[in-house]
Amino acid sequence: MTQDENKEGIKGMANPGRYGIERIAYLLMRLTGLGLLGYFIAHVYETSNILRGRMGWDDFLAMTQTTEGHIFLVLVIGMCVFHTGNGIRIMLGHGGVGVGKPARPDYPYDPASQNYRHKIGIYSSIVLAAVAMMYGMAVMFGE
Amino acid sequence: MAQVSSVADEQPPNPLSTTKSILLRISRFNPEFDETNKFMEFTVSYEKWTTVLEAILDVKKHHDHSVAVRYSCRQATCGSCGMLINGKPRLACFTKISELDSNVVTVEPMNNFPVIRDLAVKFERLFDTHHKIKPYLINDDSEVNSNEKEFLQSPKEVENYIQFANCIKCGLCNSACPTMTTDSSFVGPQALAQAYRYVADSRDKGKDTRLDIIDESHGIWRCHFAGSCSQVCPKGVDPAMGIQFLRGYLLGFRS
Amino acid sequence: MKESTIMKIHYGTALASVGLVAVHILMRLTTGFSDSLSYENVLANYRSVPYVIMLELILILLAVHGFNGLRVILLELKQGRVYEKAVSYGVVIGMIVLIGYGSRTIIMTNMGMV
């Protein structure tokens, strides 16, 4: 500890245990966003192999059509669905939708903005992501 | 280092007394001499109404008067005794040991604030950001020269902001905020909630000025609605709600 | 550009890309996942003008949204005038390079330069 701002750093940002599901959603949103950007860049590069003709395309496709490649794609599907679902929840919240109404606070001061609507939104995004991943697995491994 | 003390001993005998004891771990750090913090341990007796602040003051009184802690009102009004209690930002005077449901209570200085010594932190930046959003009514007219002599508000108009006027500037929200764990320039939930408090006040005419102030790269958009600020607020201010409403103005959802 | 304008673009690109990416994924599923990725099928997709316009839109929308998201994360990680300028210019360059590279694939394939 030094006489600086005593900041927790990335460890504190990434430590969701103390603050419930909303903080976990915050962390997952970041991680899935970064993961999807990485995948998007890789996907743009991957599809550029079409310019190498049939041989180039088939060679590259063979590298991705593996068990590992399919598992990676299933993860991408999960990240995409969670990021979309939770993103829509956050956008609605940012517009002031579903965050409750100002009122005189009463003890024990449960915050109205951390209400069941947003919790349901987070859990739904996680469940939808899981369902989409299972569907993705069925499509890719079922063939 | 472990020492024994009893807050309960100082109370008059009580037939309903159910004295128990906990291990109180206090973070010790003096930035002038220390490289890192260390913990001192004290066994403290407590009753179900004993607060963490009382336990710390008991340690100061009986064992080590050099423990640095800031406090004043002891009733969650002055906002002085914010600290990390078992890893979560809380007011020491507003947290009963019995509510923590643990035999070990660890107290540390709040994160995201520079440490003065032990449990006392500097509030300069919090007050600077609070000041930055113009925490006062902006209105060219005044109650002195207005024809009506006073600015009347309906109960509904008062309800729009009264919750946010409860802020005691304790800094717990800034300590819990995930953005503030890394962003030294972020204006923070405390200041943003106060910006909403004045924007929502029907007597105030400074909405556009304040929205301009917070609409910058380390302003309101660095909030991601994690809601940790609202979860730790000891006065029910709910900064996350105020911030989303404020953002609604900037996105055009509110006028 | 004002931060609120940037964030409006961030939300707008997110919403628009959700719909378009859904269509893009459904196109993979309608003909069977493996078949849809066959050389002939992919080439046929690239030769279809409406599909190519959609791909180009997805490319632009996701590049803008993704790189702005990266900018937000990087700005929150570290502060400083030089660092923040480097991040802002860096993500714009990243965006342009990615859109340029992806557009090259789309345009060349569409024009039969394979």
Image: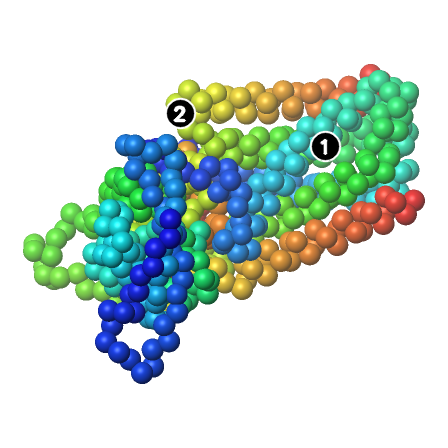
Q: Nearer the viewer, residue A8 or C96?
A: A8
Q: Is B135 displayed left or right of B187 in the figure?
A: left
Specify few, some or many for label 2: CA neighbours under 10 Å numbering under 14, 14-19, or 20 or more: few
x and y percentages locating residue B156 in the rendered image: 31, 67
Q: Nearer the viewer, residue B187 or B89?
A: B89
Specify few, some or many for label 1: CA neighbours under 10 Å numbering under 14, 14-19, or 20 or more: many
SS of the residue under disc 2 = loop
x and y percentages locating residue C40 in the rendered image: 91, 29
Q: Residue at the spot x=82%, y=39% of the render?
A: A70
Q: Is B66 displayed left or right of A123 in the figure?
A: left
- Residue found at the very far left of the displayed protein: B144
Q: Nearer the viewer, residue C39 or B114?
A: B114
Write down the residue under mark 2. Answer: C80
Answer with mark 2 or mark 1, whichever residue precedes in sequence.
1
- Above or below, comparing residue A49 to residue A116 in the picture: above
x and y percentages locating residue B210 in the rendered image: 30, 43
- Above or below, comparing residue C112 to residue A33 in the picture: above
Q: Quadrant of the N terminus of chain C?
A: top left
Q: In which quarter of the image is the C terminus of chain C?
A: top right
Q: Residue at the spot x=48%, y=59% of the render?
A: A114
- Above or below, comparing residue C112 to residue C66 in the picture: above
Q: Mark 1 — on which chain does it sit? A: C
Write down the residue under mark 1. Answer: C55
> Amino acid under label 2?
Gly
Q: Residue at the spot x=36%, y=72% of the render?
A: B19
Q: Which of B63 and A16 is in front in this view?
A: B63
Q: Residue A94 carries which label?
A: none
In front: label 2 or label 1: 2
Q: Quadrant of the rendered structure where residue A2 is?
A: top left
Q: Are marks 2 and 1 on the same chain?
A: yes
> Amino acid under label 1?
Leu
**Residue B25 visible to an observer of this rendering:** yes
